[in-house]
């Protein structure tokens, strides 16, 4: 996917300068994102760093504006990548998904306080057949396992 390099909005008075370390961090994150959205884990981690450290603030007022103007994606899509990367990091080493869409069902498994449920995600992944590959399921890799746990989580109906 080619990145959409749009001009930043003009006339913004509340933009803040980045120090040298922050500029280097932003450059490294943007290089990761610029390599393409194929590596959703690296992209998600780069986006979370830019968002959490407000590395966009020199040229953009907020993260939403940064995503739209710098990358041509919505804030919602950026957050999908962030959440998918976080879930991916929770998965056991080995048979891991190749893209954000394959991980998306797992991002809905949450604790009562809204955080990702590491235990629930691990349980769902553990219950899926070892012979199943992520590619077999396309965009919904855990449909079979999710159907088995639907009573427990009530999210994959």
Image (spheres, grey):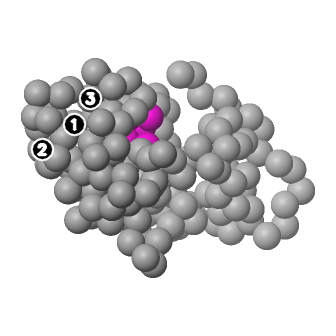
* Sooner in the amino-acid sequence: mark 3 or mark 1: 1
Disc 3 target residue: 134
Point out the residue furthest to the bottom here: 113
CB atoms of marks 1 and 2 within 8 Å: yes
Residue nearer the viewer, 45 or 6: 45
Q: Is residue 15 above or below residue 99?
A: below
Q: Main secondary structure of the magenta part?
A: helix
Point out the residue furthest to the front here: 151
Asked whether 101 falls inside the magenta stretch, the response is yes
| In the image: residue 54, left or right of residue 103 | right
Residue nearer the viewer, 92 or 129: 129
Point out the residue furthest to the right here: 11
Residue 96: which disc? 1
Please provide percent x and percent y for residue 104: 43, 43
Q: CA distance from mark 2 to mark 3?
A: 13 Å
Q: Is residue 137 above or below residue 119?
A: above
CB atoms of marks 3 and 1 within 8 Å: yes
Please provide percent x and percent y for residue 120: 27, 61
Disc 2 target residue: 93
Evaluate whether residue 119 shows in this view. yes
| In the image: residue 89, left or right of residue 155 | left
Residue drawn at x 77%, y 45% is 8
Provide the secondary structure element on which disc 1 rests: loop
């Amino acid at each position: 996917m080619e990145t959409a390099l749009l001009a930043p909005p003009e006339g913004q008075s509340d933009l803040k300068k980045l120090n040298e370390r922050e500029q280097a961090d932003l450059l490294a994150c943007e290089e990761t994102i610029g390599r393409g959205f194929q590596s959703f884990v690296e992209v998600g981690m780069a986006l979370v760093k830019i968002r959490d450290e407000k590395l966009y603030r020199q040229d953009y007022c907020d993260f939403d504006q940064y995503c739209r103007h710098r990358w041509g994606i919505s804030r919602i899509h950026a957050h999908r990548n962030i959440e998918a990367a976080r879930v991916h990091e929770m998965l056991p080493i080995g048979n891991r998904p190749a893209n954000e869409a394959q991980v998306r069902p797992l991002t809905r498994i949450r604790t009562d306080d809204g955080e990702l449920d590491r235990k629930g995600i691990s349980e769902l992944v553990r219950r899926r057949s070892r012979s199943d590959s992520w590619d077999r399921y396309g965009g919904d890799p855990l449909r079979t396992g999710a159907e088995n746990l639907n009573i427990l989580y009530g999210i994959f109906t």
